């Protein structure tokens, strides 16, 4: 049985955007592409409607590239349980109110029992201190927090 991966919007953006002139971002884009072309077949991939909404913003050509890339990936519904869990992340001040969408990405992946949430958002998601606090709330609510990581951490051997 394959592990399940939720692809957060930043992953999709790095995958299809033009190569950055910023060396760090360019390296992250390359790792994203390496993961996509060499590792994704080992996992069952998922998105949420939130990823589609966020991917639909901005330049029309870039929007089309993002949406075409993910068109065949199953969508997870934004269930009431996810909304409630996301609100708990905010009300407990684990995430700031401006990161409400980030809280929803995490809560959707959590309630569906996703194994990994793949992201380049290291401020609010792939952040060890925040994850520790998120995991505590999830456990109290009867859920297990997915491993939230960058593609670097999910490259395998």
Image (cartoon, rainbow, N blue to C red):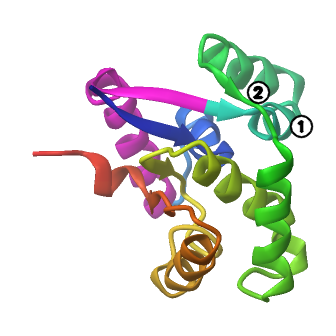
Residue 25: x %, y % from top left: 50, 57
Work out whether residue 156 or residue 22 is closer to the camera in this orientation and state it: 156
The quarter in which the C terminus is drawn is top left
Q: Is residue 16 among what the camera can see? A: no
Q: Is residue 79 above or below residue 135?
A: above
The answer to the question of whether label 1 and label 2 lie on touching residues, with beta carbons closer than 8 A, is yes
| Helix, strand or loop under label 2 | helix
Q: In which quarter of the image is residue 103?
A: bottom right
Relative to 13, is 11 on the left or the right? left
Q: Quadrant of residue 96?
A: bottom right
The quarter in which the N terminus is drawn is top left
Residue 80: x %, y % from top left: 86, 48
Mark 1 → mark 2, Cα distance in angstroms? 7 Å
Q: Callout 2: few (<14), some (14-19), or many (20+) C-alpha neighbours within 10 Å?
A: some
Asked whether residue 34 is drawn in magenta, I would say yes
Which residue corresponds to mark 1? 58
Work out whether residue 3 or residue 28 is closer to the camera in this orientation and state it: 3
Chief secondary structure of the magenta span?
Answer: helix
Q: In this view, does 152 lie above or below 65?
A: below
Residue 15: x %, y % from top left: 53, 34
User: Which segment is the magenta one?
Assistant: 23-46
Furthest residue to the left? 157
Which residue corresponds to mark 2? 62
């Amino acid at each position: 049985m394959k592990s399940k991966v939720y692809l957060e919007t930043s992953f999709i953006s790095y995958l299809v955007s033009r190569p950055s002139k910023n060396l760090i971002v360019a390296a992250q884009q390359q790792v994203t592409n390496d993961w996509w072309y060499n590792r994704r077949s080992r996992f069952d991939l998922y998105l949420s409607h939130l990823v589609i909404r966020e991917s639909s913003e901005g330049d029309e050509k870039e929007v089309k590239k993002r949406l075409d890339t993910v068109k065949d990936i199953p969508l997870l519904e934004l269930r009431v349980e996810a909304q409630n869990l996301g609100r708990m992340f905010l009300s407990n001040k684990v995430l700031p109110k401006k990161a409400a969408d980030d809280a929803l990405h995490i809560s959707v992946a959590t309630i569906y029992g996703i194994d990994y949430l793949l992201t380049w958002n290291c401020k609010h998601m792939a952040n060890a201190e925040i994850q520790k606090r998120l995991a505590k709330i999830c456990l109290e609510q009867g859920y297990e927090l997915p491993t939230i990581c960058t593609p670097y951490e999910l490259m395998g051997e």
